[in-house]
């Protein structure tokens, strides 16, 4: 038996991108996607990595913290299993011109019993956008009037001018330009509210957060486990069907897989390299598979020696064409990953493989050598090495980087070597602070179901996840054009044009689309992956 086994539908929009209902949604267990009648008091244990930062939504942009944050908090909207949306804390989100949006709230409380008000949202977004607070999710505020391209408040301002509190249950959001799909992103954690008590000491608050979602924090033992219990104040569409979720921190997926097989762990969100070819037929577990929306990629730091200027662009193209993505995905991942043809993923609305210049993602040894030689004529590479950085506590990371280094070395005849970080947390700190000195892993799990989310936050000037620090005005203008498009056809064409810039400049290497592969222990029920490739934890029972 397999749970949530679905056939890949390349190029077909599996997600209802703008399916947001602006009328009121009642509380309770939600629909068939988000609810389960098979409730239990049993606590579910799930594999995790140690969060990089305290558990503050505006500071979190990695999965170790993100999966926890999404259970502790509720946003204005929620995403169903397929990526379509329904209202959560919002009673309605409306606009006459797609530029000024009015948000009305339901009656809602934080887990400490204090009310969630319009100010709870506006103050949280203002905190996230204030440059001195250095919040990782600041970029997501960039569409709002009164923010910079990087999403921070404009110079000299402490708040976002486009946010206005009307009354306790109402606030308005004024954008820089009309954007018909703006509400689509409002279920992402950057837009979660914070209680007033958070601001006295945000670091201390992040150790013991007070959320408004289906769970509340019981305890966080760093580098060991994070224990969540159901939040009795929650009356939304994602009610806990279990007695709690405990995220167990693992530094390698092999140990987690062993624990799943032995019944010492309930849910594993990723299968280790060694089991990819056998897990689907392993009688000791229940395999879980689903089409993936994760884009696996690597980025070049903008100042990486040998990869700057015109010579650097040619070398980036040469490295990309020296990589045999088909061989990597088949031999290493047994078909659970698919060679990339763009910088997003096939489940996204408007996806296409017809991107000008995307032949640079295809293996072509002769062309790779030719472009490297052209770069050498401009500026010799000398005895430099190309290092490829990754953390080794995630499935597939070490094996893929080892294989990539060998392919590059064999095709181009240069020194290419892995650079390992033992934990995701350690790797993120080096990546965030531009200390890798290497081509580095930069896989992307979407925050909301849109191609825009793969492009702007990762490659937009000053964006929070643009760790390569790349900047291109033409690309930025095309992302803005897509956001302001009046219809889907124009929006999708702007995404194609923006990706054509990426194919030419190659600030990063799009490598593969990662299918969701996981496992559940015997006796664990209702395990499904959502549109992000994340287990729907609140529905899992045993």
Image (spheres, helix red, strand yellow):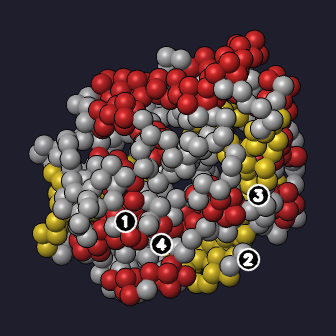
Mark identifier at residue 418: none
> What secondary structure is marked by label 1?
helix
> What secondary structure is marked by label 4?
loop
Name the side, left or right, on which 119 lies relative to 334: left
Disc 4, disc 1: CB below 8 Å?
no
Question: Earlier along the polypeptide chain: callout 2 or callout 1?
Answer: 1
User: Disc 3 designates what residue?
Assistant: 421
Disc 2, disc 1: CB below 8 Å?
no
Q: How crowded is mark 3: few (under 14 residues within 10 Å), some or many (20 or more)?
A: some
Name the side, left or right, on which 85 lies relative to 287: left
User: Disc 4 designates what residue?
Assistant: 56
Q: Nearer the viewer, residue 284 or 487?
A: 487
Q: What residue is rendered at 37% in x and 82% in y?
A: 199
User: Disc 1 designates what residue?
Assistant: 131
Question: Earlier along the polypeptide chain: callout 3 or callout 2?
Answer: 2
Q: Residues within 10 Å of mark 4 (few under 14, many from 20)?
A: many
Q: Calculate the distance from the C-alpha at mark 3 to the C-alpha at mark 2.
A: 19 Å
Numbered disc in front, either 4 or 1:
1
User: Disc 2 designates what residue?
Assistant: 224
Numbered disc in front, either 2 or 4:
4
Q: Nearer the viewer, residue 122 or 468?
A: 468
Q: Where residue 485 appears, x then y in whole percent?
A: 26, 31
- Report the quarter where the N terminus lies: top right
Q: Where residue 477 appears, x then y in whole percent?
A: 32, 34
Q: Calculate the distance from the C-alpha at mark 2 to the C-alpha at mark 4.
A: 19 Å
Q: How crowded is mark 2: few (under 14 residues within 10 Å), some or many (20 or more)?
A: some
Question: Earlier along the polypeptide chain: callout 3 or callout 1?
Answer: 1
Q: Nearer the viewer, residue 12 or 24?
A: 12
- Report the quarter where the C terminus lies: bottom right
Question: Earlier along the polypeptide chain: callout 4 or callout 1?
Answer: 4
Numbered disc in front, either 3 or 1:
1
């Amino acid at each position: 038996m397999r749970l949530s086994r679905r056939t890949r539908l390349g190029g077909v929009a599996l997600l209802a991108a703008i399916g947001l209902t602006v009328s009121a949604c009642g509380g309770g267990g939600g629909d068939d996607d988000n609810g389960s009648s098979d409730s239990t008091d049993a606590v579910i244990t799930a594999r995790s990595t140690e969060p990089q930062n305290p558990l503050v939504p505006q500071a979190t942009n990695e999965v170790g913290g993100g999966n926890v944050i999404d259970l502790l908090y509720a946003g204005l909207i929620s995403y169903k299993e397929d990526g379509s949306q329904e209202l959560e804390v919002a009673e309605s989100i409306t606009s006459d011109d797609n530029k000024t949006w009015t948000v009305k709230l339901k009656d809602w409380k934080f887990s400490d019993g204090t009310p969630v008000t319009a100010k709870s949202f506006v103050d949280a977004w203002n905190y996230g956008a204030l440059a001195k607070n250095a919040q990782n999710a600041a970029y997501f505020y960039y569409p709002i009037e009164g923010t910079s391209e990087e999403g921070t408040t404009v110079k000299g301002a402490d708040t976002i001018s486009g946010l206005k509190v009307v009354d306790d249950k109402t606030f308005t959001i004024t954008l820089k330009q009309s954007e018909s799909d703006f509400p689509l992103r409002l279920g992402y954690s950057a837009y979660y509210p914070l209680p007033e008590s958070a601001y006295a000491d945000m670091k201390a608050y992040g150790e013991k957060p007070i959320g408004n979602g289906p769970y509340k924090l019981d305890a966080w033992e760093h580098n060991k486990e994070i224990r969540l219990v159901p939040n009795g104040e929650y009356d939304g569409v994602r009610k806990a069907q279990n007695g709690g979720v405990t995220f167990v921190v693992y530094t390698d997926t092999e140990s987690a897989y062993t624990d799943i097989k032995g019944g010492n762990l309930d849910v594993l969100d990723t299968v280790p390299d060694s089991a990819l070819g056998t897990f689907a037929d392993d009688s000791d577990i229940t395999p879980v598979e689903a089409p993936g929306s994760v884009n696996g990629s690597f980025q070049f730091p903008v100042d990486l020696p040998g990869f700057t200027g015109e010579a650097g662009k040619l070398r980036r193209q040469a490295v990309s064409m020296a990589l045999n993505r088909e061989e990597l995905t088949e031999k290493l991942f047994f078909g659970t990953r698919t060679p990339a043809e763009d910088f997003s993923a096939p489940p996204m609305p408007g996806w296409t493989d017809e991107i000008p210049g995307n032949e640079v993602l295809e293996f072509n040894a002769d062309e790779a050598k030719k472009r490297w030689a052209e770069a050498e004529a401009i500026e010799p590479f000398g005895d430099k090495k190309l290092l490829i950085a990754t953390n080794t506590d995630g499935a597939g990371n070490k094996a893929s980087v080892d294989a990539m280094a060998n392919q590059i070395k064999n095709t181009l005849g240069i020194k290419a070597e892995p650079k390992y970080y033992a934990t995701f947390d350690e790797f993120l700190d080096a990546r965030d602070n531009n200390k890798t000195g290497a081509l580095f892993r930069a896989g992307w799990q979407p925050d909301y179901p849109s191609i825009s989310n793969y492009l702007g936050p990762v490659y937009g000037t000053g964006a929070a996840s643009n760790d390569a620090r790349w900047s291109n005005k033409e690309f930025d203008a095309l992302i803005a054009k897509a956001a302001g498009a009046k219809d889907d056809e124009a929006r999708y064409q702007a995404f194609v044009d923006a990706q054509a810039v990426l194919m030419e400049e190659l600030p990063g290497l799009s490598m593969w689309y990662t299918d969701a592969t996981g496992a559940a222990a015997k006796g664990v029920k209702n395990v499904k992956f959502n549109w992000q490739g994340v287990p729907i934890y609140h529905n899992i029972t045993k």
